[in-house]
Image (cartoon, rainbow, N blue to C red):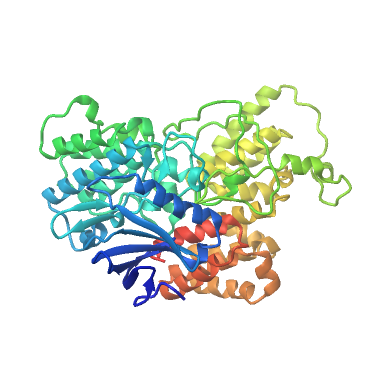
Amino acid sequence: MPFIPGENIGPYRLMEQLGQGGMATVFKAYHSALDRYVAIKVLHVAFQDDPNFLARFQREARVVARLDHQNIVPIYDYSEYESRPYLVMKYVDGETLKARLSRGKLSQSEIERVVEAVGAALAYAHKQNILHRDVKPSNVLLTEDGQIYLADFGLARMAQTSETSLTADRMVGTPQYMSPEQAQAKPDLDARSDIYSFGVMLYEMLVGRVPFNADTPFAVIHDHIYTPLPLPRTVNPDIPEQVERVLLKALAKDPDDRFDQVDQMVKAFGSALRGEYLPTGDFVPLEYAENTLVTAPEEETLVPAGAGNLVSAFAEVSDKAGTDKTETDKAPKVQKRSYIFWIVGGLAGLLVAGLLTVMLVNRMQDRNPDEENSLVSVEENIIPEEPAAANPEEDAGRAETALEESIAAWRTGDLDVAIDSLKKMVIFAGRDRDFYLGAYQQMMDRGAWLLIAISIYDTDRPLVLNILTENSEAMHEVLYYAAEDPMARDFFMRHKDHPMFVVASARFELYNGDPFVAKEKLGEVLSTPRLLEKFPEADLLEVEIFAVMEDYVRARQELGNLLENNDLPQWIRDNGIIIGEEINF
């Protein structure tokens, strides 16, 4: 196999492996013709036949080649060796900011230099309409002579252009440093998304930790979207109040509340750090966190949100523009939306994936009405005909209120009330398919996967069966993410003999029971070819189990095997890539 230290790759001789990420491996190499060391970044063999990842890799070469800045690692060359593409970059002799932080707290002067250098690099890239989208300490390189570089534009994307790219519709990045809008896979990212990630990195340098961390990437993503920012001064009282206010502004949930440009953030931070007066516009009052962030209950349940691609199954094609803003202590109302669905072989997109359109209406229209599980037969046999509502608008409002009550009760841990409200929602919504689609979108946005699962299996009139069971891959995702919810114990016990729950039940044990029991349950699936073929997410769960049990060697080994399977549903592959980032795959 090529790309082993000691081998020659074109004119370059590989010296040593410098690092490995979720998509590529980086080597130090020697270029004898020019008598200099270079860094070679080669795409993992698991992705070389994947045109999407190949396109991303090629785009990195084109995008970064346009950037000529003293704080951005330049690219020298792009080529292929035995069908594996690689980049040739400047070799930076030093350490990453992540490694430096692991050795202890940075001095004020060190922090200032990092902020100025990374800020200058981002500002320059943004002026070229290029977003980085993965700003984090491991992508900041520090040299012994004091030079600072921003590296790895592998997730870079043209900003404010019509360029179509792999990442245009996918969620990419590192969970701990991901902006809320990036975590929600919104397609119209701008400089403020990088500013948020930059703010997370600054928070870590000042406070000593990232603002949000959890056992799973999905829980971290949930926190970035919904959980109030831990106030820096409550974690580290030594941080000046003015500096805290700059951090709050950079890390606002709503992009409109952040700095518009990186230059503004760098200038405000420098002034605050030196104790200089800041104009009011550069401040965020301390009440900001209470007044504009989503207030979470004291013991909010962390469940996966935006992590899978059920979002893909409910891609919105709405006549209404704009989005709801979340109010404190209140789940936002569901707006009636029109959706279009297609059945596809598997759901495309996720986590690292986003809102890819997987549409079902055409499929439903084309179904044979004589089929056993056709749309018509399901509706006639499960949901009896009902007279038209006397006041449809009033019932729609009651259904929305019941939905809000259900989500609010779930967030506070009162699952009984949540289920009662969910049943009321079904009664008032009747046959309003658009309402259900909007409701499930809302539940997904809030991470309430368990409520979706309960509405499918436990409500008296599960119209959602007509929406989800036709796409079994969506059902796999719903149960997979619902299994992380601690409140799901009774639900999974009620359905422990249901064949659809075989993998999800094992995942529930992993996060809410005994990992060894989870491993034993999963072993039954992995040892049965018929089940493994039906539940490909079992391979993903195996990687998770080894990672949770801190057997990182096995986790990386199984992840490599998983990613070599090009027939996997995209949501499984993308989740594997995110886990790979966590275990330094």
Above or below: residue 397 compared with residue 405: above
* Residue 568 coordinates in the image, percent (x, y): 61, 61
* Residue 202 coordinates in the image, percent (x, y): 24, 47
Residue at point 68% right, 74% down? 529
| Nearer to me, 328 or 47 | 47
Left or right placement of residue 356 versus residue 29 in this view: right
Above or below: residue 246 compared with residue 373: above
Above or below: residue 420 compared with residue 347: above
Number of labels in the image equals 0
Write down the quadrant of residue 312 in the picture.
Answer: top right
* Residue 289 coordinates in the image, percent (x, y): 32, 36
Q: Residue furthest front?
A: 33
Res. 303 visible in picture: no
The quadrant in which the C terminus is found is bottom left
Residue at point 39% right, 34% down? 254
| Nearer to me, 228 or 37 | 37
* Residue 339 coordinates in the image, percent (x, y): 65, 35
Left or right placement of residue 337 versus residue 375 in this view: left
Residue at point 19% right, 43% down? 116
| Nearer to me, 415 or 51 | 51
| Nearer to me, 179 or 389 | 179
Left or right placement of residue 171 versus residue 538 in this view: left
Residue at point 19% right, 34% down? 268
Res. 136 visible in picture: yes
Left or right placement of residue 559 versus residue 532 in this view: left
